[in-house]
Amino acid sequence: MILREIIPILVVCSCLSPLAPAQEVSPSPSTIPSSSTVEHTQDFSEIVVRITSVRLTPSAKLSIKGKLSPKLGLDAAFGTGFCLDAKCRFIATNYHVAVTTRSDKIKREKIIQRYFATGPHDKGATANYVPNVGVLPFAMKRDLAIFELRRPLPHHHGLTFSLDELQVGQEVDIYGYAKGMINPIRKLARFPATFKAPTTSGLLAFDYQLSAGKPIHIQGASGGIVVDRKTEKIVGILSGTNETTAVAVPVQTLADFVSKVQPFLAQRIFPTTKEISPVSADLYPKFVPPPDHYPKFVPRRVDGLQHRSEEPYEVSVLRKKAQLLADSMRNFIAVQSFAWGSGNKEPAAQAEYEVRIIDGVQRFRRYPGGERELEEIPNPRVNGWVNPADEWSKVPNMVGTEFRLKVHQAADVVVNEQRMKVFQYHASAEDNLCPFAPVEDFGFFTRSKTVAVACYGEVWTDEDANVIRMSQHLELSDKLKAYRGWEDCQVVLTYGWLRRENEPLRLVPLTIFIEARYKKHVYWCRGQFRDYQIFSSSAKILASDYVQSLPP
């Protein structure tokens, strides 16, 4: 663990389809009625947003006299999105909307990151016709994208989601910014509909309630929301329409997508997701081993030799699996994101770095395009922060076979429909396994002293003892001057399977969460790994019986 303090307070502690994508001719939409006609409590103009891009396209025109002259045209693309989170810093929409509009801003807020659930190289991609664009290959059942904004949209908010199974005939409303008869005027429209059935491709089909008026084009409604009329919860994301039917991507598909690209966000808006929460709390009280709990060595035998004590079989398997995990992460490259904040606030700073691990040594380069190699990530420009270091590899190594960490197996539990084995560990300050390095920064010089502290935590594994989650808590004392005022410093790590064709399954770090409290302030850092490149040491990994016996 590394802690940095800048006076007065600055901290670093590491602890071609029959249904086109919502662009076809459709029944005339209902204008949003007054509350006397349809009972609703939400102002959907604060939830659903326009996505538009207009670009000047230079070209040439041929005059009657046969002379070429320059000409400027307008290239306009339209779509709809909606607030994904409560504070509306993330906008969800369709993949085909995100790709064809190529927006840089939404309501004047800059887009800082784009996440796509599908694309032309998706295993399930098919050729889909998008009006005014042409053929676009992607998987319709994953026609989703997310925009991350620099700041939340003011006066906007998200809506709750429903993961319940829809019933045939269930009444819903579809909201989207359809392009009006006068281009490019767009108004938020409501399309009454009823649930028809799930499609064979994994989408949800809805029948429109046809109006007496003539159909109009609803180009621009893609990425809108399908809302249950009674509960006003989102049940789908509009993806395609024809004259009588609309199809939508299920909310469960959205939840799976968000869990993969923004796991911390997913836990807030989809609390019933099957993924392990990256900020999950320990399940049991702190483990305090008795004095004779797995002593490092048993008394000297008659032959004068010393040997390690026997321990439960499950604990010995955990040690081997944890050591295998630590060894398998000695050489790889990934992109690691960081978000710093305090309390329940939105992140005050964000950054991404390419992390390179070579023979267990960690180095960073700013992503993308960074050239200078860094031993540590630079401190964020905020008043207080905590930073992760390399706990994602050190904690598995500490639990592994190299050290005789005191480990206790607790009762199994079921977490999000997954049966988990739970192990608890404890290391005393004398074990020197959990160093704590507070740093005082005086501007012109720094002063630091590493202190060994006691620590404890939990390890969650699947039924085959593969590590899924690990935690570490530092036992800090407010009586020591070196870190007086600091309490509740903890780390939560999650791991998952890296699945690639023609390669064995590998456990890799997914998320790292650091949190520490200084007096009345709680500082945190959320980190996430993606875009893995694993190299060398493959022979060592493949040689293990445990890896060979992994489930398909």
Image (cartoon, helix red, strand yellow):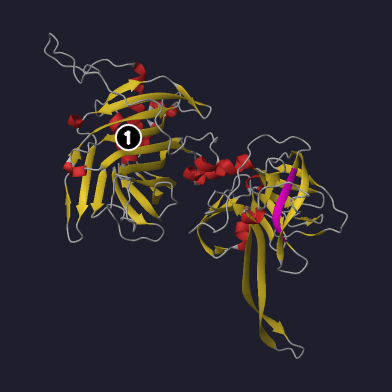
Which image quarter: residue 306?
A: top left
Q: What amino acid type should be assigned to the residue bearing mark 1? A: Gln
Q: Considering only vertical position in the picture, is 317 above or below 329?
A: above
Query: Which residue corresponds to mark 1?
Result: 472
Q: Whole-percent x and y of residue 455?
A: 27, 32
- Secondary structure under tag 1 reads strand
* Residue beneath the point at 22% across and 36% down: 477
* Residue beneath the point at 66% across and 49% down: 42
- Provide the residue span drawn in magenta: 172-178
Which image quarter: residue 292?
A: top left
Would residue 391 be found to the left or right of residue 183 on screen? left
Q: Is there any visible trace of residue 19 in the rendered image?
A: no
* Residue 33: in magenta span: no
Q: Considering only vertical position in the picture, is 200 above or below 302?
A: below
Q: Whole-percent x and y of residue 449?
A: 16, 45
Q: Main secondary structure of the magenta part?
A: strand
- The N terminus: image quadrant: top left
